[in-house]
Amino acid sequence: MCSWSTKKQNIVALSSAEAEYVAASRAVSQAVWLRRIIEDLGEKQEGPTIVYCDSRSAIAISENPVSHERTKHIAIKYHYIREAIEHEEVKMEFCRSEQQLANIFTKALPREKFIHKRELIGVTRK
């Protein structure tokens, strides 16, 4: 299952890791919501949903339940990601930025990379 969206964050992130963490938290929230809908339809997903992130720092923040000096200012609602990992509803995995297909929607890419990613998502030009 994959889901893409882009949304302007309504907070000011103090680092790129924090911005990625907030975005990952929203993705995790959506993944858990979709898992529950599927379960309500009578299908239970075995194992956690994999959430790919291109920030090792954001993954480290999400997997470490100890509150650090650098992350204590992040709103509690974004720490939902830690609970979802603890309950094995999701698992965070690193994915290099070059492999992120969603970058076609969120970043200015050189023509060659744009065409390659466009083909990977199944969009062809006539």
Image (cartoon, grey):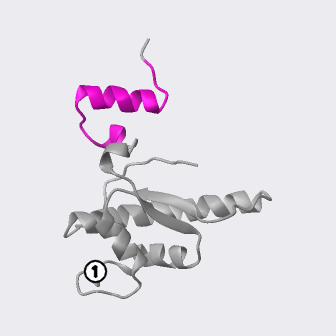
Residue for point 31% across, 78% down: 74
Residue 98 in picture, x, y percent from top left: 31, 44
Residue 111 among those drawn in magenta: yes
Residue 91 in picture, x, y percent from top left: 51, 66
Question: In the rendered image, is residue 10 in sight?
Answer: no
The answer to which image quadrant residue 125 occupies is top left
Q: Which residues are magenta?
A: 103-124
Residue at the disc numbered 1: 71
Q: Is residue 103 above or below residue 27?
A: above
Q: Which secondary structure class fits the magenta region best?
A: helix
Quadrant of the frame with the C terminus? top left
The residue closer to the viewer here, 46 or 26, is 46
Within 10 angstroms of label 1, few (less than 14), some, or many (20 or more) residues?
A: few
Q: Is residue 110 left or right of residue 60?
A: left
Which amino acid type is marked by label 1? Thr
Residue 12 in picture, x, y percent from top left: 22, 67
Residue 112 in picture, x, y percent from top left: 27, 26
Question: In the rendered image, is residue 49 in sight?
Answer: yes
The answer to which image quadrant residue 101 occupies is top left
